[in-house]
């Protein structure tokens, strides 16, 4: 079972294997460690399908990214949340090469405005490869979002550490 | 206004004198100046006039945590003193965010300024939670955001307003992360439609404020509900921005009694803004608050000698973006889009690959919008729409990134449209009853001939639309529509799922037939589903099949089935014509068949006025001429 589990991970999430190569202290995997995955707008009762209706008054849904990556409140966790919540639009804008959601994602990441275009250009080929790979359609939304997140963080860490340091 | 200023001066003087005597100086000063009667204080705590209460006020807030005095909800003076004491109390190291200065920063801002409190007279509290919410650089400006109406949910018919707190930023594209504050009814799960409507109308629900990053609302309104977002950025100075922002923080998580017609989202958001002295944007003397009316008032208001609205930003829904891109394609490109929708593998055909990069980019951009418009979270990964979308996305990835961002065409903004209410006076000739005069009152909102900025084209939405006629001394009710909804898809692209679905629902009373003299009114609930097709650039025709439930008037029975057709055309920009033909048959009564023919012509004579002439034949022939005014 453990062998099959490893193969499962290898087959469907090759990018996540690279997590073991992450520098120490770069933080948890938000997707596995911070509870990312619940749909923000689940299939709710018909009366609540418009946001004219409050669906949870108690949630403090606004948080700001801090510079510490080690916690689930760090900027990388915020980036992961954003990608998960807005996945389809983030991928669409990556295909187009620009968009307000990409700007927002990179703002959360702390990347300078001048670096946004280069970061998007850098990740675009890998994202393209991911969405056209066999088995992509069968992956869950969270798995797809995690794949995108890994592409982004790997590329930023390797090629844009200074531009995205804030 | 002069009285308020006098209060402030008295408070300052009293504080100066009292400060020489004791540490309760601010309280003494506040009492001496009757600050609890100040408009800003009353609005900060949302006090409303209430004759049944000893002090003449009761706060609209029902959450106990909003008050610092035990009787704070009904005693502005006690609440003011309790607030001051709490503001001046020492801060506990383990929970500074619970200090009154952090829980009620707007009250604190106003009290500091009004009483001119000196820094050495109060504790300095660091409000980490509020600072984090407000962002490291604070709020630069505040916007009212109007989501246009949505005919698939009664709570959303008239649109929705939320507040957006704009952080300092260099690009409009970065504003999705701004904080937004929303107000709405707190509806329990598993509620039935009847309870939902009754509780919403008659105050059976609490309403509350919540907050979330703006991108969540942008996604929900723009992608799920296909509603355009219009952002009205306000021209306020930094002190005003700080006060409003702080007050919004005070309200997050607090509850009110929710009333759909009057004390709804538009009312509560406008109420927040009216904390600023001299600003009045809530429509007065109305039993209802329509979001578009608040926006119109905002657009007409002045602040510091300049328009209150400094900029209007448009965020089209996915559907609007699709229609905009599609309309920008030439006929050959439109055919290419249709061909790919019919067979996505055409993307790999040499004929498509031979097109220029820019042409392929434009076609694919339109297709992306089309498939995103059609995608539904419930579709499986192997659903044909998902598969087709993946192919389009892959094709787009194979082309270079967009170099130029094409701005969508901006339609007329909601504040540029006409007022929501309609009043019409006119004359009528009925071949059976003779001549008469008519009066029509429609409190809100629009019909297929006058749907305008912020409305769904060719659709209808009205409540309590009442038509009366006097023939000599006899008053007759022509009709009262308690509610009338006609939701149409205008088949703009003609692509699958954008091919003109339509439905309608009417509940009300109307004359059984024209020319009816006695015992004429029948109570009817009518509904129908249909399809529409475009006729020309601005025209639409449609066919409905439907049914009627009614009281049995003169043996007509309780049920009818009907088929109806309509055609809306616009020969000129200000001239609209609607033709209607309806054929009904009784399913359980004596009425064999019944045909109604109608022609309505509307000439827009001014921004807030029109002239209408109509002919109808249903038993008798009726011709009407009316002059209308929007209010």
Image (cartoon, coloured by chain):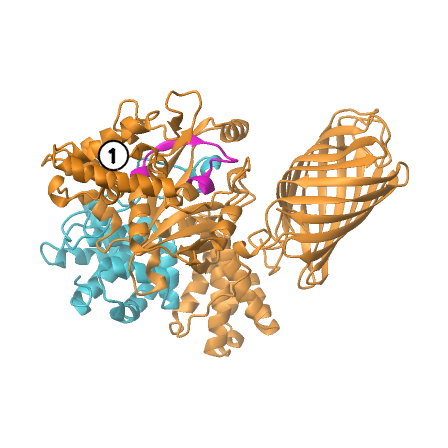
Chain colours: A cyan, B orange
In the picture shown, does residue A118 fall above or below A26?
A: below
Residue B20 appears at what percent x and percent y?
12, 37
Q: Nearer the viewer, residue B477 or B539?
A: B477
Determine which quarter of the picture holds residue A160.
bottom left
**The N terminus of chain B lies in quadrant:** top left
Q: Which residue is mark 1?
A: B30
Residue at x 83% of width, y 24% of height: B555
User: Is B482 placed left or right of B8 in the picture?
Assistant: right
For numbered disc 1, what is the local secondary structure?
A: helix
Residue B516 appears at what percent x and percent y?
86, 32
Determine which quarter of the picture holds residue A95.
bottom left
Residue at x 55% of width, y 57% of height: B416
Q: Nearer the viewer, residue B7 or B628?
A: B7
| Magenta run includes residue B476 | no
Is residue B12 among what the camera can see? Answer: yes
Residue at x 30% of width, y 46% of height: B243
| Magenta run includes residue B251 | yes
In the picture shown, does residue B18 fall above or below B328?
A: above
User: Is B352 placed left or right of B543 in the picture?
Assistant: left
Task: Mark 1: give few (<14), some (14-19) or many (20+) Cα within 10 Å.
Answer: many
In the picture shown, does residue B408 fall above or below A36?
A: below
First to last magenta residue range: B250-268
User: Is A71 placed left or right of B276 in the picture?
Assistant: left
């Amino acid at each position: 079972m453990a062998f099959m589990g490893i193969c499962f991970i290898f087959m469907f999430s090759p990018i996540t294997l690279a997590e073991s190569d992450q520098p120490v202290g770069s933080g948890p995997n938000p997707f596995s460690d911070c509870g990312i995955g619940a749909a923000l707008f689940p299939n709710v009762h018909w009366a609540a399908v418009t946001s004219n209706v409050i669906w949870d008054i108690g949630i403090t849904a606004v948080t700001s990214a801090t510079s510490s990556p080690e916690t689930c409140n760090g900027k990388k966790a915020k980036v992961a949340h954003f990608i998960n919540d807005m996945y389809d639009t983030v991928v669409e804008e990556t295909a187009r090469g620009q968009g307000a959601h990409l700007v927002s994602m990179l703002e959360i990441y702390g990347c300078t405005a001048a670096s946004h275009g280069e970061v998007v250009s850098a990740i675009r080929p890998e994202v393209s490869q991911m969405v056209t790979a066999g088995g992509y359609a069968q992956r869950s939304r969270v798995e797809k979002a995690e794949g995108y997140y890994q592409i982004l963080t790997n590329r930023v860490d390797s090629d844009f550490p200074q531009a995205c340091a804030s | 206004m002069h009285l308020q200023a006098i209060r402030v001066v008295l408070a300052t003087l009293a504080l100066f004198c009292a400060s020489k005597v004791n540490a309760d100086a601010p309280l003494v000063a506040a009492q001496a100046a009757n600050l609890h009667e100040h408009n800003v204080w009353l609005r900060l705590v949302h006090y409303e006039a209430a004759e049944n209460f000893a002090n003449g006020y009761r706060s609209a807030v029902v959450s106990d945590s909003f008050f610092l005095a035990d009787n704070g909800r009904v005693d502005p003076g006690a609440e003011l003193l309790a607030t001051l004491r709490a503001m001046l109390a020492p801060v506990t190291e383990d929970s500074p965010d619970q200090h009154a200065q952090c829980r009620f920063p707007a009250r604190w801002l106003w009290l500091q300024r009004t009483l001119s409190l000196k820094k050495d007279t109060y504790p300095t509290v660091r409000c980490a939670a509020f600072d984090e919410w407000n962002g490291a650089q604070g709020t630069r400006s505040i916007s009212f955001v109007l989501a246009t109406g949505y005919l698939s949910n009664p709570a959303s018919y008239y649109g929705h307003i939320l507040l957006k707190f704009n952080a300092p930023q260099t690009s409009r594209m970065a504003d999705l992360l701004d904080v937004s504050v929303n107000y709405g009814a707190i509806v329990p799960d598993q509620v039935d439609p009847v309870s939902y409507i009754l509780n919403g109308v008659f105050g059976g629900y609490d309403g509350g404020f919540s907050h979330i990053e703006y991108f969540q609302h942008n996604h929900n309104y723009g992608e799920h509900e296909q509603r355009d977002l219009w952002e009205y950025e306000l021209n306020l100075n930094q002190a005003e921005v700080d006060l409003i922002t702080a007050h919004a923080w005070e309200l997050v998580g607090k509850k009110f009694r929710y009333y759909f017609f009057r004390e709804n989202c538009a009312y509560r958001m406008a109420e927040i803004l009216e904390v600023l002295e001299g600003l009045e944007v809530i429509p007065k003397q109305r039993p209802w608050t329509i979001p578009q009316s608040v926006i119109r008032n905002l657009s007409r208001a002045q602040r510091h000698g300049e328009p209150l609205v400094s900029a209007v930003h448009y965020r089209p829904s996915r559907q609007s973006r699709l229609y905009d891109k599609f309309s920008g394609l030439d006929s050959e490109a439109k055919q290419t889009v249709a061909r790919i929708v019919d067979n996505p593998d055409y993307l790999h055909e040499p004929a498509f690959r031979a097109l220029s990069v820019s042409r392929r980019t434009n076609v694919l951009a339109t297709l992306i919008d089309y498939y995103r418009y059609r995608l539904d979270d419930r579709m499986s990964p192997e659903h044909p729409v998902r598969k087709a979308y993946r192919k389009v996305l892959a094709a787009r990835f194979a082309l270079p990134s967009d170099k130029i961002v094409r701005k969508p065409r901006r339609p007329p903004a909601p504040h540029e449209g006409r007022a929501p209410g309609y009043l019409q006076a006119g004359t009528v000739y009925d071949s059976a009853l003779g001549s008469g005069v008519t009066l029509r009152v429609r409190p809100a909102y629009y019909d297929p001939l006058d749907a305008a900025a912020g409305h769904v084209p060719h659709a209808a939405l009205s409540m309590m639309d009442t038509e009366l006629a006097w023939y000599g001394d006899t008053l007759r009710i022509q009709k009262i529509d308690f509610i009338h909804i006609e939701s149409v898809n205008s088949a703009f692209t003609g692509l699958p799922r954008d091919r003109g679905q339509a439905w309608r629902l009417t509940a009300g009373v109307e004359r059984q037939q024209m020319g009816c003299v006695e015992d004429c009114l029948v109570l009817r609930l009518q509904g129908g589903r249909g399809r529409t097709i475009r006729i020309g650039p601005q025209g639409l025709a449609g066919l409905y099949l439907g049914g009627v439930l009614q009281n049995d008037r003169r043996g007509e029975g309780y049920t009818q089935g009907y088929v109806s057709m309509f055609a809306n055309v616009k020969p000129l920009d200000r001239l609209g014509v609607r033709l209607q033909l309806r054929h009904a048959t009784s399913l359980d009564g004596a009425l064999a068949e019944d045909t109604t023919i109608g022609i309505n012509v509307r000439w827009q004579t001014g921004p807030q006025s029109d002239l209408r002439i109509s002919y109808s034949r249903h038993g008798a022939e009726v011709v009407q001429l009316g002059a209308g005014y929007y209010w």
